[in-house]
Image (cartoon, rainbow, N blue to C red):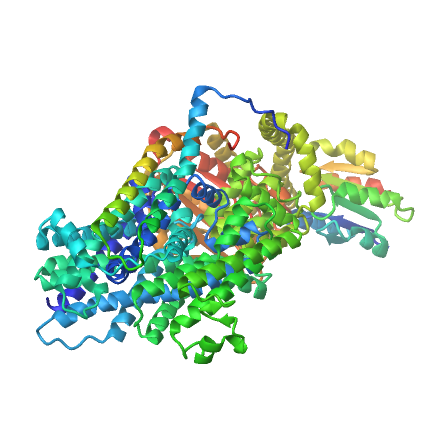
Amino acid sequence: MPFNLLVAACLLYVIFLFTVAFLVERRALIGRLGWLRSPLVYTLSLSIYCTAWTFYGAVGYAARSGLEFLTIYFGPTLVFVGWWWLLRKLVRIGRQYRVTSIADLISSRFGKSNTLGVIVTLIAVVAATPYIALQLQSVVLSFGVFASAAPDGQAPLDAGSTAIWVAVGLALFTILFGTRNLDAKEQHHGIVTAIAVEAVVKLVALLAVGAFVVWGIAGGVSDIIARIDAAHLNAWQVQPGRWTGLIFLSAVAVITLPRMFQVMVVENDDEGHLARASWAFPLYLMLMSLFIVPIAVVGLERMPAGSNPDMFVLTLPLAEGQGSLAMLAFLGGFSSATSMVIVESIALATMISNHIVIPLWLRWHPTAGAGDDLRVVVLRARRIAIAAVLALGYGYYHVSGGSAALAAIGLIAFLGVAQVLPALIGGLFWRGATRVGAMCGLVTGFAVWAFASFLPSFGPGAALSEAVFQQGLFGLSWLRPHALFGTEAMDPLTHALFWSMTLNTAAFCLGSLLTFPGPVERLQGAAFVNVFDGGAGPQRWARGQAEPEALLTMAQRILGEEAALTLFQSAARDQGKEGFLPDPTPAFLDTLEARLSGSVGAATAHAMISQLVGRAMVTVEDLMAVASESAQIMEYSAQLEAREAELTRTAGALREANEKLTQLSIQKDAFLSQISHELRTPMTSIRAFSEILTEGDLPPDMVAKYGKIIHDEAKRLTRLLDDLLDLSVLENGTVQLNLEMANLQQMIDTALTAARQTRPERSFVIHRDLPSEQIYLKTDADRLTQVFINLISNARKYCDAENPELRIAVRQRAGRVMIDFIDNGSGIPKESQALIFEKFARLTDANRAGGAGLGLAICREVMTNLGGSIAYLPGQGGAAFRVTVPLRLEKAAA
Amino acid sequence: MARVKPPLFLARAPYRRRRLRDAARLLPVVGLFLLLVPLLWTPKAEVSLSSADVIYFFAVWLILIGLAAAFAPGLRADEQQPEEEED
Amino acid sequence: MTLHVLLIEDEPNIAEAMRFILSREGWRVSHLAQGTEVLERVRADRPDLLILDLMLPGMSGLEILAALRADPETRALPVMMLTARGRDRELAEQAGADRFISKPFSNAEIVAEVRALVGR
């Protein structure tokens, strides 16, 4: 087969995946995922457990060590059929506390300690690096098989450059789809669906090769059974310790591998999917391993001695002249490698950015203003982290030379991430587990693993000197990497497994027993261990003194403007308030923290909120008080609470309505007296000057000057009367709307030009995004433009910045268009925000440039008539108004 | 935490639900046992792989999958119910 | 000595008209557009008469009047209040205004009231 064809097939395949991911992202964006959120997709996405190691390596493993390869799938099978024990709890906690990674889970459970997050992240990165290298190696090997099979004298394939191209391509794909947005819950529907597609590809490919081997080469099932018996496949060297140890190890790995945690917990949409996956995923694993032994047996039989059994899946069909089957197998292997690398690097990048980059960045920019968007930093950090992870993987591949058998590297990686297990299980089931304990366990386990398994894997004399292997570390014979404490009976892997897990667990338990946890740790411990008891547990925040506006500014930096405003608005509505600023109640702070931790991890979210709230964290004494109190009233409180919340909401709404009514009644009186004032003022000038003019004997220039004053004041009177009339027509809803299609950008242009007459001496910098304004609205263009003119004029009048700027941002969502006008002045004080849309509610008289204080009131009425709204947006760093209009206004709505 | 004392005996439906959960919890234990049993068969370490071994393991595997599939719907319905005492 | 009138009025056109009318009578007119500096100005310049608009930016006419009446030094200063709202007469008189004129007014009325107030 021509080598170029192979490259073309790879490219086509990647483009196909791209398209799938892209289409799904598009559908996710408009909220129509449908069957894409089914248990089937969830189960298939779990199949990233089966990497290239399974696809190619399992056959090699079977050829070398008989049935031992099955242990790698028995572990996950037991974990999944026993989901009621552990996975259920894990997924529930993951969903409830918006966990972003396994490092986040551990850090969150042990008092939101970022140090723990960093430790787990480091372990994960170190353990994953050889694993990623393994995937690159398998792709390179499979390319090599085709290249060497090509008879047409192609230039010999340079393995190094292939690996680079594969790594770069994977990095690009992952960056494109893994870091498109900082999701509220870190979900990547596009990627997950692409992974599910790859799962199907690799299963079909392996089954096809298997079927070909059983029915194409051998003569059916009975023949293959006979061949297995005849093959005298290497004894399956049953060492009970190794067999059991491997089952245990793979069971642990399926829980703690960062990529498994990502698809199993973080990307989980629905707990019900887990129930389905509990049998469907083991079924997938079983199908994947069904033909491994036949392929190995037939491969050993047919292929020349000395050929690499890791590549039988490819070489067998090639040797039999089945080019297209080999191509399918090649794509299957390619799928296995790419899907693993993509998800693993996303998971690791999330950990690195949330636990290492962002905390550092926040330390260096503690008082960053609203201007710099933290999201940009997070996304950039993720992208760089993805590239770095792949670069590490490539580096390992390059250094190790890709010589070791696939299976060995995989098991070492498994053992590395398994070190997280004691802290994880302890954290989920034992309230007494503490942060210090977890730290001791993790560090101990990691050290033992590194010394007894990871560093020796480079070979004697590479990372550890020959002497260390022979005489032990520092010449201490009980510190030999493969015979710690003189235990020489076990093989190296079982030995490392035994000692790392034992010492890890011991250190974890001892550390936990000897230390006393802090209040946050105890709270989190109780919340995680008792996650099924319902209720979020005691509040994590005492009533804070945080300014809601400051909280909003911070939330916008992380969640983005839109999401933050929506969150704050709905929280305010739940409290019975209008607008965007809820009271910083403990409940609200909890909700906010949960949302933020979905993006940047629990530790960072917690730190950011504490910064604003000050020392409002609960203490142990508070906890005790709450606990004893709640024990007594638990029975009644649930119902009462619900009712009370309802009452509070109603009362809040009533209070607000009442306040508004009182103010309105005062305002109505004030309105009449204001009208009187506004009418009399110009009248006074007119009358005085007309009397002066009537008396005569004035120089002509004085006559002209006074005549002009009379004229101006008469115009002012007319304008005032026009406004009043306008307002009354709008308020009665009897206004005639002139609906037509109109271009938003033209309307804004017109408004900007018209508003330039207001304080023409001020030069404003206007920021616009012209492409986003290319929207055709069906509306009354003149009225809408009038609103824009009013808002822009107001900015020109009242913005008190040295170098005034005005930003106009247009957004379209769900049939509505939002136009924001944001200046860089000092904004409107909170207590006045509710009043500015009332008539004559001019804030100060300092800048009265001839207006009567009716502008915003008219705007509000116009927007109501246009089926839209206008609102003040707090927390934008200046005065900010949002105009919302329907994209297409129908007559009936007018 | 003071709760109302749970009733000592349950009606038939909740009783069945609880035994189903017990079964689900037992399943991995049974599975592990069945997967470890062959260790006791092989008398010597140097025994070559026979097809019977392969068939045995895949049979155990299929049975586990089948049982899990049988339990899953009941347990899932269980989750929709308000949580009772955990045993 | 010419009569010194201190005029507090925020509307520039009205202030211009008043200044013209009063100056024509031969009186000296000084003008402030804000309420904040009035008290200092009164103490420093010692005007013979204060014409005070009721609605002022900074400090309202009523507040200024109350402050003037509270200070023994300025208690006797004749004050004429101007307002554009009809119903403020009582408030103004309670606060101690000597005369009260509502806008719009006739020029002759102003002159007559000023004469009556300073007794010239």
**Image position of A396 (left or right of A518):** left
Q: Where is residue A830 in the image (x, y as percent from the top left)?
A: 62, 45
Q: Where is residue C92 in the image (x, y as percent from the top left)?
A: 78, 36
Residue at (23, 51) in percent of width and height: A203
Residue A317 x, y percent position in the rendering: 12, 60
When asked about the image quadrant of residue B47, the answer is bottom left
Query: In the image shown, does B43 or A337 lie closer to the viewer?
Result: B43
Residues A821 and B32: in front is B32
Q: Residue at the spot x=28%, y=52% of the render?
A: A194
Visible residue check, residue A556: no
Residue A248 image offset from top left, x and y in percent:
41, 52
Describe residue A111's horizontal placement relative to residue A237 as left or right.
right
Question: Is A162 above or below relative to C33?
Answer: below
Considering the image in quadrants, where does the C terminus of chain A appear?
A: top left
Residue in view at x 49 percent, y 38 percent: A860
The N terminus of chain A, quarter of image: bottom left
Is A42 placed left or right of A801 in the picture?
left
The correct choice, above or below, for A658 with respect to A452 in the image is above
Q: Residue furthest front?
A: B43
Closer-to-camera residue (A253/A737): A253
- Does residue A210 show up? yes
